[in-house]
Image (cartoon, grey):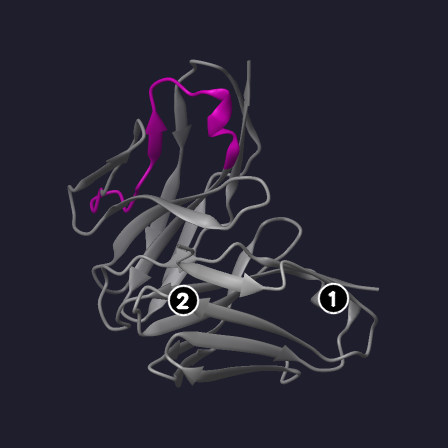
Amino acid sequence: DTAVSQTPKYLVTQMGNDKSIKCEQNLGHDTMYWYKQDSKKFLKIMFSYNNKELIINETVPNRFSPKSPDKAHLNLHINSLELGDSAVYFCASSQGSGGNYNEQFFGPGTRLTVL
Amino acid sequence: GDSVTQMEGPVTLSEEAFLTINCTYTATGYPSLFWYVQYPGEGLQLLLKATKADDKGSNKGFEATYRKETTSFHLEKGSVQVSDSAVYFCALSDFNKFYFGSGTKLNVKP
Protein backbone atom coordinates (compact mmCIF):
# COMPACT_ATOMS: atom_id res chain seq x y z
CA ASP A 1 0.00 0.00 0.00
CA THR A 2 1.39 3.36 -1.02
CA ALA A 3 1.28 5.79 1.89
CA VAL A 4 1.65 9.05 -0.04
CA SER A 5 1.04 8.92 -3.77
CA GLN A 6 1.38 11.57 -6.44
CA THR A 7 0.28 11.73 -10.04
CA PRO A 8 1.72 12.14 -12.53
CA LYS A 9 5.30 11.03 -11.89
CA TYR A 10 6.56 12.95 -14.92
CA LEU A 11 5.02 16.02 -16.52
CA VAL A 12 6.43 17.67 -19.64
CA THR A 13 4.63 20.75 -20.91
CA GLN A 14 5.03 24.00 -22.80
CA MET A 15 5.48 27.44 -21.31
CA GLY A 16 2.20 29.20 -20.67
CA ASN A 17 0.18 26.04 -20.07
CA ASP A 18 -1.81 25.26 -16.93
CA LYS A 19 -1.23 21.94 -15.17
CA SER A 20 -2.19 20.12 -11.97
CA ILE A 21 -0.43 17.62 -9.75
CA LYS A 22 -2.48 15.41 -7.44
CA CYS A 23 -1.53 14.02 -4.05
CA GLU A 24 -3.29 11.51 -1.83
CA GLN A 25 -2.29 10.00 1.51
CA ASN A 26 -3.84 6.97 3.17
CA LEU A 27 -2.10 7.36 6.53
CA GLY A 28 -4.98 9.18 8.20
CA HIS A 29 -2.80 12.26 8.69
CA ASP A 30 -4.36 15.67 9.05
CA THR A 31 -1.54 17.82 7.66
CA MET A 32 -0.21 17.86 4.11
CA TYR A 33 2.56 19.80 2.40
CA TRP A 34 3.96 20.73 -0.99
CA TYR A 35 7.69 21.13 -1.50
CA LYS A 36 9.75 22.18 -4.50
CA GLN A 37 13.17 20.61 -5.02
CA ASP A 38 15.51 22.33 -7.45
CA SER A 39 18.30 20.82 -9.52
CA LYS A 40 20.75 21.24 -6.62
CA LYS A 41 18.47 19.17 -4.38
CA PHE A 42 17.52 22.20 -2.26
CA LEU A 43 14.09 21.57 -0.73
CA LYS A 44 11.74 24.50 -0.23
CA ILE A 45 8.35 24.34 1.44
CA MET A 46 5.56 25.95 -0.55
CA PHE A 47 2.30 25.23 1.26
CA SER A 48 0.90 23.35 4.21
CA TYR A 49 -2.71 22.42 4.96
CA ASN A 50 -4.10 21.20 8.25
CA ASN A 51 -7.59 19.68 8.07
CA LYS A 52 -8.20 21.38 4.73
CA GLU A 53 -7.12 24.76 6.11
CA LEU A 54 -4.09 26.60 4.75
CA ILE A 55 -1.53 27.11 7.52
CA ILE A 56 1.70 27.77 5.65
CA ASN A 57 1.90 29.83 2.50
CA GLU A 58 5.49 30.69 1.75
CA THR A 59 6.56 33.27 -0.78
CA VAL A 60 5.33 31.52 -3.88
CA PRO A 61 4.00 33.16 -7.07
CA ASN A 62 0.21 33.31 -7.05
CA ARG A 63 0.28 31.22 -10.23
CA PHE A 64 0.54 28.31 -7.77
CA SER A 65 -2.74 27.45 -6.09
CA PRO A 66 -3.19 24.51 -3.71
CA LYS A 67 -6.57 22.87 -3.25
CA SER A 68 -7.51 20.47 -0.48
CA PRO A 69 -10.92 18.86 -1.09
CA ASP A 70 -10.51 16.73 2.04
CA LYS A 71 -7.75 16.00 4.50
CA ALA A 72 -6.48 13.02 2.46
CA HIS A 73 -5.90 15.05 -0.70
CA LEU A 74 -3.85 18.10 -1.56
CA ASN A 75 -3.60 19.09 -5.19
CA LEU A 76 -1.35 21.72 -6.74
CA HIS A 77 -2.51 23.74 -9.72
CA ILE A 78 -0.02 25.85 -11.64
CA ASN A 79 -1.12 28.53 -14.12
CA SER A 80 0.93 30.04 -16.93
CA LEU A 81 3.90 27.75 -16.46
CA GLU A 82 7.37 29.28 -16.75
CA LEU A 83 10.78 27.74 -17.45
CA GLY A 84 11.80 28.36 -13.82
CA ASP A 85 8.99 26.14 -12.60
CA SER A 86 10.91 23.09 -13.81
CA ALA A 87 11.72 21.08 -10.69
CA VAL A 88 10.65 18.04 -8.72
CA TYR A 89 7.58 18.65 -6.59
CA PHE A 90 7.06 16.56 -3.47
CA CYS A 91 3.93 16.07 -1.49
CA ALA A 92 4.23 15.07 2.17
CA SER A 93 1.96 14.42 5.13
CA SER A 94 2.25 14.31 8.90
CA GLN A 95 0.00 13.88 11.88
CA GLY A 96 -0.75 17.13 13.69
CA SER A 97 0.73 20.53 13.09
CA GLY A 98 1.35 21.90 16.54
CA GLY A 99 3.74 19.37 17.95
CA ASN A 100 7.42 18.89 17.46
CA TYR A 101 7.50 15.15 17.02
CA ASN A 102 5.70 14.56 13.81
CA GLU A 103 7.91 13.30 11.06
CA GLN A 104 6.77 13.85 7.52
CA PHE A 105 6.11 11.10 5.01
CA PHE A 106 6.97 11.96 1.43
CA GLY A 107 5.51 10.97 -1.90
CA PRO A 108 7.73 9.79 -4.77
CA GLY A 109 7.77 13.21 -6.43
CA THR A 110 6.58 14.68 -9.72
CA ARG A 111 9.28 15.80 -12.12
CA LEU A 112 7.95 18.83 -13.99
CA THR A 113 9.76 19.96 -17.13
CA VAL A 114 8.66 23.18 -18.80
CA LEU A 115 9.87 23.62 -22.40
CA GLY B 1 14.37 32.37 12.69
CA ASP B 2 14.91 28.65 12.76
CA SER B 3 17.37 27.11 10.32
CA VAL B 4 19.48 24.05 9.60
CA THR B 5 23.01 24.06 8.23
CA GLN B 6 24.70 20.94 6.98
CA MET B 7 28.04 20.28 5.37
CA GLU B 8 28.28 20.71 1.65
CA GLY B 9 28.90 17.73 -0.49
CA PRO B 10 29.54 15.67 -2.30
CA VAL B 11 31.21 13.36 0.17
CA THR B 12 33.05 10.49 -1.50
CA LEU B 13 34.14 7.49 0.55
CA SER B 14 35.36 3.99 -0.05
CA GLU B 15 33.26 1.07 1.13
CA GLU B 16 33.66 0.31 4.85
CA ALA B 17 34.92 3.83 5.62
CA PHE B 18 33.59 5.86 8.55
CA LEU B 19 30.99 8.49 7.74
CA THR B 20 30.24 11.78 9.43
CA ILE B 21 27.88 14.38 7.99
CA ASN B 22 27.73 17.52 10.11
CA CYS B 23 24.48 19.28 10.93
CA THR B 24 23.93 22.29 13.16
CA TYR B 25 20.72 24.13 13.85
CA THR B 26 19.25 27.32 15.27
CA ALA B 27 15.83 27.24 16.88
CA THR B 28 13.75 29.45 19.13
CA GLY B 29 11.94 26.58 20.84
CA TYR B 30 12.74 22.97 21.62
CA PRO B 31 12.74 21.29 18.24
CA SER B 32 12.72 17.69 17.19
CA LEU B 33 15.55 16.72 14.86
CA PHE B 34 15.54 14.35 11.91
CA TRP B 35 17.71 12.83 9.24
CA TYR B 36 16.07 11.96 5.95
CA VAL B 37 17.62 10.02 3.06
CA GLN B 38 16.78 10.39 -0.62
CA TYR B 39 17.87 7.61 -2.94
CA PRO B 40 18.18 8.43 -6.66
CA GLY B 41 14.81 9.02 -8.29
CA GLU B 42 12.87 8.61 -5.06
CA GLY B 43 11.22 10.74 -2.39
CA LEU B 44 12.65 11.41 1.04
CA GLN B 45 12.49 8.69 3.68
CA LEU B 46 12.89 9.19 7.39
CA LEU B 47 16.19 7.66 8.51
CA LEU B 48 16.18 8.53 12.21
CA LYS B 49 14.96 11.12 14.66
CA ALA B 50 15.50 12.52 18.16
CA THR B 51 12.91 14.49 20.08
CA LYS B 52 14.87 15.90 23.02
CA ALA B 53 18.37 16.77 24.14
CA ASP B 54 20.78 13.84 24.56
CA ASP B 55 18.47 11.49 22.66
CA LYS B 56 20.22 9.24 20.17
CA GLY B 57 18.42 8.23 17.02
CA SER B 58 19.60 5.12 15.19
CA ASN B 59 18.59 3.05 12.20
CA LYS B 60 20.35 0.81 9.65
CA GLY B 61 23.71 1.39 11.33
CA PHE B 62 23.35 5.18 11.23
CA GLU B 63 23.34 7.19 14.46
CA ALA B 64 22.91 10.82 15.49
CA THR B 65 22.83 12.40 18.94
CA TYR B 66 20.83 15.53 19.78
CA ARG B 67 23.41 17.88 21.34
CA LYS B 68 21.73 20.97 22.75
CA GLU B 69 24.96 22.48 24.05
CA THR B 70 26.50 22.53 20.57
CA THR B 71 23.16 22.73 18.68
CA SER B 72 24.26 19.81 16.55
CA PHE B 73 22.87 16.54 15.21
CA HIS B 74 25.72 14.95 13.27
CA LEU B 75 25.04 11.77 11.32
CA GLU B 76 27.53 8.90 11.68
CA LYS B 77 27.98 5.39 10.39
CA GLY B 78 30.86 3.13 11.21
CA SER B 79 31.13 1.31 7.89
CA VAL B 80 29.38 2.59 4.78
CA GLN B 81 28.23 0.44 1.89
CA VAL B 82 27.75 1.24 -1.79
CA SER B 83 24.00 1.03 -1.17
CA ASP B 84 24.25 4.02 1.21
CA SER B 85 24.95 6.32 -1.75
CA ALA B 86 22.18 8.92 -1.57
CA VAL B 87 21.44 12.49 -0.54
CA TYR B 88 21.05 13.04 3.21
CA PHE B 89 18.96 15.86 4.67
CA CYS B 90 19.05 17.13 8.22
CA ALA B 91 15.78 18.70 9.38
CA LEU B 92 14.12 20.19 12.42
CA SER B 93 10.51 20.48 13.45
CA ASP B 94 9.50 23.48 15.52
CA PHE B 95 5.75 23.83 16.08
CA ASN B 96 4.04 23.76 12.71
CA LYS B 97 7.10 24.17 10.53
CA PHE B 98 9.75 21.91 9.15
CA TYR B 99 13.17 23.24 8.16
CA PHE B 100 15.44 21.22 5.92
CA GLY B 101 19.15 21.58 5.37
CA SER B 102 20.47 21.86 1.84
CA GLY B 103 21.30 18.15 1.57
CA THR B 104 24.63 16.32 1.41
CA LYS B 105 25.29 13.90 -1.39
CA LEU B 106 27.19 10.77 -0.39
CA ASN B 107 29.00 8.65 -2.96
CA VAL B 108 30.38 5.33 -1.77
CA LYS B 109 32.84 3.58 -4.08
CA PRO B 110 33.43 -0.19 -4.07
**Amino acid of disc 2:** Gln
Q: Which residues are magenta?
A: B67-86
Earlier residue among tags 1 and 2: 2
Question: In the image, residue A22 lies at what x, y percent?
Answer: 55, 72
Q: Is residue B72 magenta?
A: yes
How far separated are the C-alphas under marks 1 and 2? 28 Å
Question: Total of numbered circles in the picture?
Answer: 2
Q: What chain does badge 1 belong to? A: A
Residue A114 visible in the snapshot:
yes
User: Would residue A98 be found to the left or right of residue A115 on screen?
Assistant: left
Q: Is residue B70 magenta?
A: yes
Q: How many C-alpha atoms fall within 10 Å of the one at disc 1: few (<14), some, or many (≥20)?
A: few
Q: Is residue B82 above or below residue B62?
A: above
Query: Majority secondary structure of the magenta segment?
Result: loop
Contact between marks 1 and 2 (CB within 8 A): the answer is no
Residue carrying label 1: A84
